[in-house]
Image (spheres, rainbow, N blue to C red):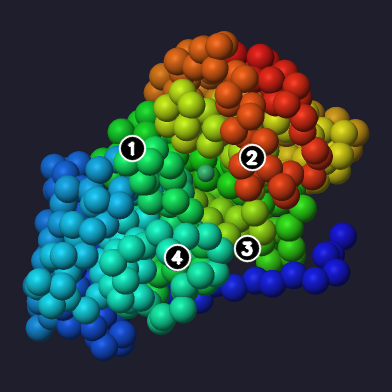
Amino acid sequence: MLPKYYEYYNPVKINAGEEALETIPFELNLLSAKRPILITDKGIVGAGLLKIVLNSFADSELVVGAVFDETPTDSSLETVNQIVKIYKEQKCDSIIAVGGGSVIDTGKGVNIVVSEGTDDIRQFMGADRLKAPQKPLIVVPTTSGTGSEVTLVAVISDNKNNIKLPFTSNLLLPKVAILDTRMTLSLPAKITAATGMDALTHAIEAYTCLQKNPLSDAHAFMAIKLISENLIKTVKNGKDKKARFALANGSLMAGAAFSNSMVGAVHAIGHACGGVAHIPHGVAMSILLPHVMKFNMDVLEDLYGELLLPLAGAEVYAKTFAAQRANKAVRTIEKMRIELNQLAGLANTLSDAGVKKEQFESIAVKALDDGAMLPNPKNLTKSDVITILEEAF
Ligand SMILES: [Fe+2]
């Protein structure tokens, strides 16, 4: 059923394919940018990926104004301020973020500070607080999971106060996202598995949450197909270029979907597991997804049933009676997780991931307070969250 009203916005230009990186100088020219700062991390440099990006400037007259390669695993206020200082000293006029979620969020954070002309990013925290047009931001993802290259969200950690600062604004959307096959080829199997399950969760929650709409549905549906068909393949053989590229597209489409609908209880509980027990986001998503689907089953049976088609393919879908499709969809995801556990050691239970039972109470309290809980189509009480945690333990 169509919503009575919805909005969909995604102006990010996508350049995708082999050697897509070579388009960066052209895109910067179009954006009238001449001196970008390149933000990345040590892992990207170590894997030889920074060199590939810098090589794309070889035949151009553009100059990379500065390279910052010390972005930590969790983007932080200190890092943002450090990069802003370099950006100003080197007279940069644009930003290229090359990395995973933390690097991309850091790039968005730097952009807020330099574009708004502020020295305190915290005043822009929350929804739609940005006012100034942002500097050109080009994003090159090196994982297939967060979808941050096409989302309006950034999360920056305030380590002094031990909180995460969320920023959402259409102005935060990058100008260009570059999916280049070379950038994910060396990603380790376990990270490929975890980030892929995060992307799958984005798509499934986008397709089933209260703010779903026909355009987010279209992106989510195709994302689920691309991820289901290619995640195991990629984990088995990380050098499979076709599968890697399909996965990168799936992750991007899942990002476009949830950036224009929302996520749901898997993310709310997963964020809380991350905050309290410090388990990686993708691992939490992978563990919790089927358990939350079972909890939501009575209100989402029809939609989950539809998702059996992209999850398991036309033949399985056609052979399964309509009344059994939703349960089969959940079983398909469980099977995928078991395989990812065997192939890459991805944790399948909260206990394996290092969560303690004593932490359930604070996880549940935090989860109920998480914004992602609001668009979940079924209300959860504290005892519902604890039951889900016990089942996933
Ligand atoms: Fe996520």
Pointers 4 and 2 in contact (C-beta within 8 Å) = no
| Residue 260: mark | 3
Nearest to N terminus: mark 4 or mark 2 = 4
**Residue at position x 50%, y 76% in the image:** 11
Lateral position of residue 275 relative to residue 369, left or right? left
Q: Quadrant of the N terminus?
A: bottom right
Above or below, 271 relative to 391: below
The residue that disc 4 covers is: 124
At mark 2, the secondary structure is loop
The residue that disc 1 covers is: 238
Q: Quadrant of the C terminus?
A: top right
Residue 30 position, x and y percent, is 30, 87
Separation of residues labelled 4 and 1 (CA atoms): 40 Å
Residue 195 position, x and y percent, is 44, 39
Lateral position of residue 171 relative to residue 268, left or right? left
The residue that disc 2 covers is: 369
Q: Is residue 195 visible?
A: yes
Pointers 3 and 2 in contact (C-beta within 8 Å) = no
Q: Nearer the viewer, mark 4 or mark 1?
A: 4
**Front-most of 111 and 64?**
111
Pointers 3 and 4 in contact (C-beta within 8 Å) = no
Above or below, 12 relative to 75: below
How many residues crowd mark 3 within 10 Å: few (<14), some (14–19), many (20+)? Answer: many
Residue 75 position, x and y percent, is 32, 48
**Residue at position x 30%, y 33% in the image:** 188
Pointers 4 and 1 in contact (C-beta within 8 Å) = no
Q: Nearer the viewer, mark 3 or mark 4?
A: 4
| Residue 276: mark | none
